[in-house]
Image (spheres, rainbow, N blue to C red):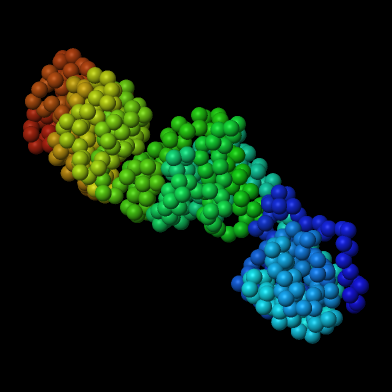
Amino acid sequence: MTASDRREVRSVRTFRPDAAGPDRLGLDALPTVAEALDEPAFRAGHPEVLEGHDRLQTKVRWVHTSDSADVARLLEGGEMLLSTGSAWPSEDDALKAFIEQLHSAGLAALVLELGSRYAEAPVAARTAAARWGLPFAVLRREVKFVNLTAAVHRRIIGSQMEALEAHAEVRERFTALALRGAPADHVVAHLARTLASPVVLENLAHEVVAADMIDGADADLLVEWERRSRAAGSLSPGETDWLIVPVDARGTRWGNLVALPGAPHPAGRLSVLEQGAIALAIGCLAAGGAEEWNRIARRGLLEGLLEGRFATTADAAARLEAAGLPVGGQRLYGIAVAGGSASVADVEAAARAIGGVALALPLDAPQPVVTVALLSMPAAHGLDQDSAQALLKAIDGGPRATMTIGRAATGIDEALASMRDAIDHSADVDSNGASGRGGRVRWADERPLAHLLNSLRGDHRLLDHGERMLAPLIEHDARAGGDLEVVLAAMLAYPSNRTAAAKASHLSRSVFYQRLAIIAALLDADLDDGETQTALHIALLARRGRRG
């Protein structure tokens, strides 16, 4: 084979996939330098890598053949250059400059066939390639360059076809999610599964709206995410090895999608993330954007905390911190607001007004119209009676609103217990009207029995006791649509004041006493007996703990 068989046509530039075109879709699927050299056509030439061993995973976008010393101007980056070296500079300095030009043009790899001009690779070329980290290989046997280019181009074109098909499938999938109105956390979870790597959705305040960590280990990744994002004020493309795509539409930006490093995807990881961002943007346009995201963030955090859906307490703390709720060095309180018109926004704004931070959530069980929150206060202050009253006043939930506060906590387990204390207390006293008074603050410490039972809520013996003792009453209410459980709760809330208990139940005294008679008959119990009242109170609290 002569040098003329590999002549360069200077007026024609070799076609290569454009960076904004198909290659963007399938960059992950393109062959690497190492994979190209491992093609059978290359192996026939006995390839040997001399320099740049640490860059063999560089992607090859196209193969170019030229012996010209001026070939760098025809390159666009990502090519593998095949050459016999017949027109390379003779002087060492000029040869080094030639290699530098190839590196500056973004060459992926240089392959020199020995025998036509060089018996061995010139030392100057090797030195320059090593300096610039350019993969430099030699072919020790003569091969037809057309076979080499054909082999790699077949693979590249095949990867592009695979990328286009994969991209079409991904686009169809996320378009379907958008049209179905899938919530943001569901889209993020789908992205994480598609990319097989953690994905975080952050709002413009750089707080986590939704995150899926794949393996369930949140803490380390979220701590690193927070360090990177807050160090520069935000995560920006090009500043990290994490993929970052804005979620925006019609001139409005709601936040960013962040994908951590993971395995290649045939459609291109960036392309997949962009499809997810489009689905999220459509959802924001349809559902109100920021407020919907806030609702999802609260639900995921607080429901996950209450239901124990976290791997470790460190993971739960990391999620709360990433969502803007300080945990370390703070006092945490579970809060439940019932019986009024307070909204989630009212509770969170009220917390800010007294120098704290809260995440709140409307809770459907054990009773409706209960807003539960986790409040974070500086350790030096905390909540006392005055600040608690200021908080309730700032909430402005109306004259019937009652706020229940759990015990102060310094860690996740204690905070979870505090939230459950507040919910259980609120359910037992306020949600069924048994308190009779609104506009007041209640503390979980006022009810040590409820606190004790909350700590034992997982004990099957306690749960069995509640279900067994109340079974006749529960069956009656279910069959007749009755209110006996509510009446029993009112009676136990006011064991020595039947008038107050009847008022709390919204029943006349005569009807209230009729209900008590039915309860006593169903349970075959003396409702005036102190031990019986204690046992029934425990059973009722245990039952509500199981339902909550």
Q: Is residue 416 above or below residue 260?
A: above
Quadrant where the C terminus sits is top left
Quarter of the image where one finds residue 405? top left
Choose between 376 and 491: the one closer to the eye: 376
Residue 437 against residue 113 in the figure, above or below: above
Quadrant in the rendering for residue 136: bottom right
Q: Residue at x 29, y 26 (%)?
A: 395
Nearest to the observer: residue 489 or residue 44: 44
Image spot of residue 496 (x, y percent): 8, 25
**Of 480 and 93, which appears nearest the observer?**
93
- Counting the numbered discs, the total is 0
Whether residue 501 is situated above or below residue 163 in the rendered picture? above
**170 lies left or right of 419:** right
Q: Position of residue 490 (x, y in %)?
A: 18, 26
Q: At x 54% / y 57%, what residue is drawn?
A: 241
The picture places residue 350, in percent across and down from the top left corner, at 30, 30
Q: Does residue 515 appear in this view?
A: no
Residue at 14% x, 35% y is: 446
